[in-house]
Image: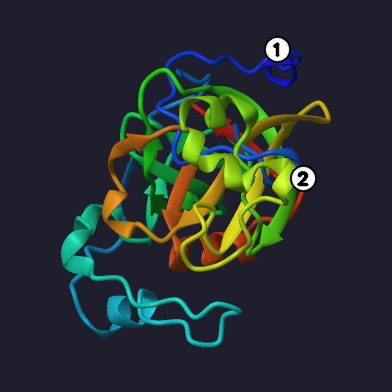
C-alpha cells in the first residue's frame, strides 16, 4: 500500500490485531531498554467487586456496553497497575506482541497494563510512532485490499460511508490513530466487542482491547503520545 510504503515502520514480526480502516477510520522487536523491561505484579488480583465493577456494564455510553464475562478472559489479561522497568518516558504506550500486553508507562517504575488481542502473522508492523488522533465510537471503513479479500465487506466501503459506530463495530468504543511523521500508518489501538479474543491472534489489522479497557486507556492518553510496538 502506498501510504504504508511512505512510513519507516517495519511490517515484519508484529501480529497486528483487529480489522483495518480508511482515513481516520481505516487501519489497514527488541528495544533499547536499559534493564529488564518485563513487568511484575504490583498486587495479585482476586475475582471480586473490584473487577466486577471494572468490567461491568456501561449503560451511560452512547451505545450501552454489556458486562464482560471474566470467565472467558484469562486473569493475566485483566487491567492492572504493575511494576515495569523501562527506559521509555512516562506516557509512552508499549505493545509487547509476544506477551499480548499493552503498557502505559507511569511514574515511579509503574505501568498500567492491558491485555490485547493481535492479528495473524503477515498482517503486522513494528516500530515507533505517535498517537495523532483519538475518536470515541468511530466509523469503520475497510480498505480496498481487505474488500478484495472479503467481498461481503463492500457494503462498508468508503464510497458507502463505512460502517456506522455501534456495539458490533470492529473498532469498538474508542480508537487511537497511529501516525509516523504525519503519515497515517493505517493501524489503530481500539476496542472490541469480542472480549474472548483478548490474548489471542485471530484477525488482521490492529491492537484491540476490551471496550472497558480502551475507554480507560483513552482517558489517560493525550494526542501526541508516543507508541512503541515490539
Residue 15: x, y in percent? 40, 27
Residue at coordinates 24% horizontally, 70% vertically from top-left?
Answer: 69
Colour pattern of the rendering: rainbow
| Quarter containing the N terminus | top right
Instruction: Name the residue tied to disc 1.
Output: 5
When the figure is inspected, residue 201 is found, relative to residue 80, above or below; the finding is above
- Distance between mark 2 and mark 1 Cα atoms: 22 Å
Between 89 and 229, the one nearer to me in the picture: 229
Residue 112: x, y in percent? 46, 56
Residue 155: x, y in percent? 59, 47
Query: Which circle marks residue 164 in the picture?
Result: none
When the figure is inspected, residue 185 is found, relative to residue 222, above or below; the finding is above
Residue at coordinates 45% horizontally, 19% vertically from top-left?
Answer: 29
Q: Is 143 on the left or on the right of 55, as rendered?
A: right
Residue at coordinates 21% horizontally, 81% vertically from top-left?
Answer: 48
Q: Is residue 90 visible?
A: no
Residue 56: x, y in percent? 36, 80
Q: Is 177 on the left or on the right of 181, as rendered?
A: left
Between 68 and 100, the one nearer to me in the picture: 68
Q: Is 16 on the left or on the right of 9, as rendered?
A: left
Instruction: Name the residue tied to disc 2.
Output: 224
When the figure is inspected, residue 178 is found, relative to residue 209, above or below; the finding is above
Q: Is residue 203 visible?
A: yes
Secondary element under disc 1, as helix, strand or loop, is: helix
Residue at coordinates 44% horizontally, 23% vertically from top-left?
Answer: 14
> Quarter of the image holding residue 145?
top right
Between 83 and 218, the one nearer to me in the picture: 218
Between 47 and 123, the one nearer to me in the picture: 123
Amino acid at each position: 500500500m502506498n501510504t504504508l510504503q511512505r512510513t519507516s515502520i517495519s511490517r515484519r514480526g508484529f501480529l497486528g490485531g483487529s480489522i483495518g480502516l480508511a482515513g481516520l477510520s481505516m487501519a489497514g522487536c527488541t528495544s533499547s531498554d536499559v534493564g529488564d523491561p518485563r513487568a511484575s505484579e504490583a498486587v495479585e488480583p482476586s475475582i471480586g467487586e473490584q473487577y466486577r465493577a471494572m468490567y461491568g456494564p456501561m449503560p451511560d455510553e452512547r451505545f450501552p456496553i454489556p458486562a464482560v464475562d471474566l470467565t472467558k478472559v484469562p486473569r493475566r489479561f485483566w487491567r492492572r497497575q504493575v511494576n515495569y522497568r523501562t527506559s521509555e518516558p512516562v506516557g509512552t504506550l508499549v505493545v509487547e506482541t509476544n506477551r499480548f500486553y499493552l503498557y502505559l508507562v507511569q511514574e515511579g517504575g509503574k505501568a498500567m497494563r492491558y491485555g490485547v488481542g493481535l492479528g495473524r502473522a503477515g498482517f503486522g508492523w513494528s516500530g515507533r510512532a505517535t498517537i495523532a488522533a483519538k475518536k470515541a465510537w468511530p466509523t469503520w471503513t475497510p480498505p480496498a485490499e481487505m474488500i478484495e479479500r472479503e467481498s461481503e465487506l463492500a457494503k462498508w466501503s468508503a464510497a458507502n460511508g463505512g460502517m456506522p459506530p455501534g456495539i458490533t463495530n470492529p473498532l469498538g468504543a474508542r480508537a487511537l490513530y497511529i501516525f509516523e511523521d504525519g503519515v497515517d500508518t493505517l493501524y489503530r489501538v481500539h476496542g472490541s466487542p469480542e472480549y474472548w479474543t483478548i490474548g489471542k491472534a485471530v484477525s488482521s489489522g490492529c491492537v484491540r482491547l476490551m471496550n472497558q479497557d480502551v475507554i480507560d486507556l483513552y482517558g489517560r492518553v493525550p494526542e501526541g503520545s508516543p507508541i512503541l510496538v515490539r
